[in-house]
Amino acid sequence: MNKGLAALCAVFVGVATVATGRYFWDFGFYPHATGASTIAPAVDTLYLIISYVTTGMFFLVWSLLIGFMVIYRRRPGAKSHYSHGNMKAEVIWTIIPAAMLVGLAFGQIPTWAKAKQEFPQPNEVDKETNQPPVVLQVLAQQYDWNFRYRPEDNRADFKRAVDPADSSVTDYAIEEAVHPGPMIVPCGRKVFITQTSMDVIHSLFLPHMRVKQDAVPGMYVRVWFQPVKFRVVELPGNFDDWNRTDWDKRIDWVTEKDYDGKYGARRVAFRGIEFIVEKAWKNPDTEKIEVMRKLMTRPAKVDIIHNGKVEWDVPLSDTARRPTHAVIPFDLACAELCGAGHHTMKKTLWVGTETMYLAWLGKESENATPAIWKRWVERKPSW
Amino acid sequence: MSDAHAEHGHADPGHGHDAGGHGHEAMGFFRKYVFSTNHKIIGKQFLFTSLIFLLVAGSLAMGIRWQLAYPEKPMPILGSIIGLSKMDRKAIADIQEKADKEGRALNDAEKQDVESRYAINDDEFIMFTTMHGTLMIFFVIIPILVGAFGNFLIPLHVGTHDMAFPKLNALSYWCFWLACVLILIGFFVPGGHSQAGWTGYSPLSAHHAPAATPGSSQDPDWFHLGGQDFWLLSMFFVGMSSILGAVNYLTTILKMRAPGLSMMRLPLTTWGQFITAILQLLATPVLGAALMMLMMERFFDANFFTPSGLEVSKQAMSARGGHPLMWQHIFWFYSHPAVYILVLPAMGFTSDLLAVGCRKPVFGYKAMVFSMSGIAGLGFIVWAHHMFVSGMNPTLGMAFMVATLVIALPSAIKVFNWLGTVWRGSIRFDVPTLNALTFVALFTIGGLDGIFMAASPVDIFIHDTYFIVSHFHYVVFGGSLFAVFGAIYYWYPKMWGRMMSATAGKIHWLLSFVFFNLTFFPMHIIGAGGHMRRIPGIQYYPFLNEFHWWNQFISISAFCLGATQLIFIGNFVLSIWYGRKAESNPWQASTLEWSIPSPAPEHNYHTIPTVNTGAYEYGKDGKEGMDYEPQTEQKA
Amino acid sequence: MRRPILGSTMLALALLAACGDDKGTTGGVVPSTPSTAVNTTPVAPKTDAPGTSTTAPTDDPSPVLAKTPEIRFAPTRADATPWNPQDGASVTGVAKLMGEKPPRRKKVPTDKDPKCTEEVREEGEVVSKEMQVKNVFVVVVSGHEKLSFSKPEAAVKIDQKGCHYEPHIFGMMAGQKIEVTNSDDTTHNIHGLPKKSKEFNFTQPRKGQVDNTTLENAENAVTIKCDIHPWMGAYAFVLPHLLFSVTQDNGSFEIKGLPDGEYELLAWHEVYGEQRAKVSVKDMKAEAVTFTFEKK
């Protein structure tokens, strides 16, 4: 019976190895969403290094284990080797892993410090980008994200600091601030966020930016990131193809410097078109219900940027002015259990050029201030 | 050594030649079998209770996987138990009532409506994840590893009649039993059970009015207690049970060892229990304090963990002055050592089972003892690696990051020593050995995952994703639970005098191993892709879309894995009556418990043995052609 | 048998349960309710202890919203006649807002759920160009005692359509069924927050799903919200009678079935607060009532 078991095991391990190899061939060593911020390469490289080290260790241990199981299986006449251990071996396999672990530990401290401690100063021109950072406040609630931009963003002389130590941090006039729906930031500038929560602990997760930080009630927590590229997708000419096209092949990553050269002259929709997951979608080709299908939204109207000028509220049905491309936002999620609606705390992060950003903010200033911000400012909790 | 084992007068069910014999009281059924103070019966009580909870928590896991794979489909089999929320039941009753009033059967639309109600609801999903975690950790793994095997084996391994404090031992079980009753009641409370995660973070868990989750609200019809309150009370009693047990174990091991049995001659199983008991004794009171503080927060507005100015559901919270991070620090100060409680006894079993199965002494016994101690000691200074992105000072994060990477070292040493044990052995592939080898293999994977998580920049991305879920399932299921399977097969004869079926055991092992890896390995992939924990599906997140297929694959594997465990349960239960009768030492093992008949008699040892060697004298030429020397062997 | 540890544990548990009773700060005794409702608990109203800090949160976290009205309904007289909406006069009227220009209804960002494709505007202040106010709840607060009312069998309906509640404000009798429908192709989570009845809180993932719930005790301006779409809100008045009306787009309301007598009306708007007016019905006729609100 043991031989049968061994054969089955060998089959399983063989199939698993082939499948895993095929997976890594297709997706690379890590299936992360593509990194789009300045910290992403460091985080991803660290992940890769650890992957190599641990995979190597895994193969070492498993091949020894399986090898020993085969070689030292009980055979008539064979005896086990009586030994209580070997001090030299112990020393070797203590020192070498210890050195590797300590090296790994100290090697990654600069990355951690950069991600979590080297904040851009809200009122100063940042040395790396030669521009002041975008400053925004995030207020998390069950179950939505609320954003606020100070009204005179983008100005280096804006005097009121958004500083967690300053208890008047919520004090700039509620009506003057812009309260966008999604999070909107310009590519290439640093973004400085002060975040907190209205009720329970939430966590701001921007997967493409490699940002995750808990929004803790009772604390203002600082987060920063700098997007380096954003996504532009080519829209098919035929509306019928919007739901059937393999969108991921049509995505182009572009930096704010490249944008004008590549797409400046094109008609690019920069608000309203985004990915959506349809829980149950009827495929018009096969007439079958598909679960969890990624589609593109098709809003009635979009805003288009063309040669640096913005055209607002262009109906998509207007074939003469139809956009040829669209800027696609990134995902924003909550990554800390915050109640029954935790999974619905989805929002988007729109990243675009400076022109798009200013146009966005201008348009979003028409939005209502969420009642929750009004109550928050009124309450002025002094933590 | 001590005369604490003068407590006689309790019978062992069924077989002891000494049935009730010391005769001053004839024992009723309840004193003998239910409220017994005999460590073996108490151990079995823990085992039975935990196996029941294994089924309950496993069903919740099936519900979780069903929701992730087939979000709106009605769940078969278990759907009528766990798929129907209160609103669903009410709606079905209303539809039926309407049809009855009109004197007709349900029409198609109504039938579809009723059927659709058997799907798992998004809002109940969180309760499933919370209770699956809570039950598995506190009501399955800890009670089996520590309550069942600690109780059963420690007196046998140290060569004494019973624990140092038999009545305290019984109290430990009955505290646990009370905890079980309380946690089960929570499922029936109107607001539902706790929905705040097994970690119970505040302020999510901290208030009943306004309640941040339905499970947090309190119902006046239920003594003003809600699901969260039953959770808290129950955990408190689990903690109490652990602490009482730990006192007993430490005293027994330190004070009641047989003559000649020095600490360095103890089997590593006993060392595992010893070190685990120290962890429990030192860490569990901290959990008790945290729970007590949270209960005071909920009942008396003590405001430990809630700052001022908060608002839930448009209602102001009147709390002020607390800090949510304080809960996290106090909770994780216990819960990190707790995860070592979840694994150290299993490491002890693995060492024993490998030595017996490979007919070799454990490679590097002293190194094994020191690394278990190192894991336990270092385990107290790494807790905030659960809090890297929690808002605590990042410099503190650096310190914990270094400590967490260092704690990988003793575990690595242990893995190499196990490899050394297998090396040049003569491996008998019986069921305990297979399971022990699986522990080594799968614990390695789980441990290597730890390196990713310890690296705090990487943790920024994988925190609270399925990467973490994969990691802890590899160490607790792939590690501890497989070791538990092996331990149950191995010590079953000593418990019931019968052998479990080896054929069923091997089939269970192979299928579990295959399906376990098919279920949990892909979670590394989706976790590294950013798939968050505790979400009932990817339906709101386009960036996770490519992982839906993986969710379905994992779920199907999980259903097969769940079904496979029925083989084990069947084997376990049926072998009690139909298993082949066992001799006293079916495994040719050298530790003390195998020198007495199977099942173990009421007082274990008729005369306390004298120990002359360590526990692992395998591979030597012993008497009568045996290839080992029992611990009680008389030296020439 | 002495079991001191067990005994004291039991005692502690009993004490904890007993003291875990109502908060004590409010003294609000919550009546125990028949368990027809689900997933619910009564939420004891919290009044603040005298503040030690100037930044103590107020009891009402929504200073932008008007206070819920305090109404004492006189109990039904012993000789009351059953109410018949066809039998009696209709009291009509209009609710207006002082001023020249209606307040602008700003857009509400619904980007959180792309399935909410229809534009949603703020619902707090819906005022027409002629300064007529919609969604004012008008209710008879005195004069109703001579009529008796039985709880209607029909349910009061609330629908989740276009990611907002339809109707925005409604009245019902205590214990009347509330039929909740989800007409949207997205999951909604209706969450009622009464202070005097059991909360209801449940999701409806399917389009077309219908569930029933209720509010058992009389209460004014019960907040109803959606946990998933935080901009959605509605109000329910749970009344001991059915003499109420909600103003339409043109600000008009009509309360039917009032026999001759003196009545007092209360009109409540969620931002503008309350106004009261007296009206008398003579010979089955009544004067039209105008409520004029002022924005503070």
Image (tube, grey):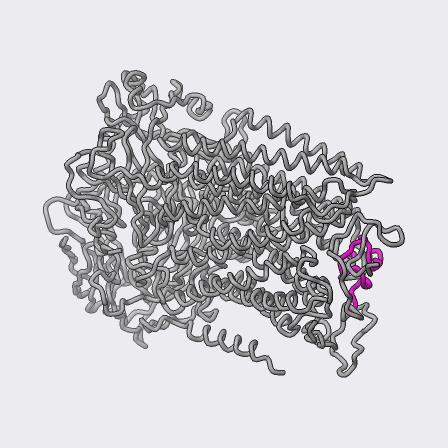
- In the drawing, does residue C269 fall left or right of residue C150? left
Residue found 35% across the figure and 59% down from its top: C193
- In the drawing, does residue A170 fall left or right of residue C234? left
Residue A139 seen anywhere in this rendered image of the structure:
yes
Q: Which residue reaches farthest front?
A: B636
Instruction: Give whichever of A27, B184 is nearer the camera.
Output: A27
Q: Within the magenta stretch, is there residue B592?
A: yes
- In the drawing, does residue C70 fall left or right of residue B146? left
Q: Quadrant of residue C78?
A: bottom left
Quarter of the picture holding the C terminus of chain A: bottom left
* Rendering coords of residue A244 (x, y %): 46, 24
Q: Quadrant of residue B258?
A: bottom right
Looking at the rendering, the stretch of residues picked out in magenta corresponds to B572-601
Quarter of the picture holding the N terminus of chain A: top right
Residue B605 drawn above or below residue B396:
below
* Rendering coords of residue B469 (x, y %): 53, 45
- In the drawing, does residue B593 fall left or right of residue B54? right
* Rendering coords of residue A275 (x, y %): 40, 31
Residue C115 seen anywhere in this rendered image of the structure:
no
* Rendering coords of residue C62 (x, y %): 25, 56
Residue B614 drawn above or below residue C106:
below
Q: Within the magenta stretch, is there residue C213?
A: no
Instruction: Give whichever of B307, C103 is nearer the camera.
Output: B307
Labels in figure, total:
0
Q: Quadrant of residue C69?
A: bottom left
Q: Which residue reaches farthest right?
A: B624
Residue B361 drawn above or below residue C14:
above
Residue found 45% across the figure and 48% down from its top: B385
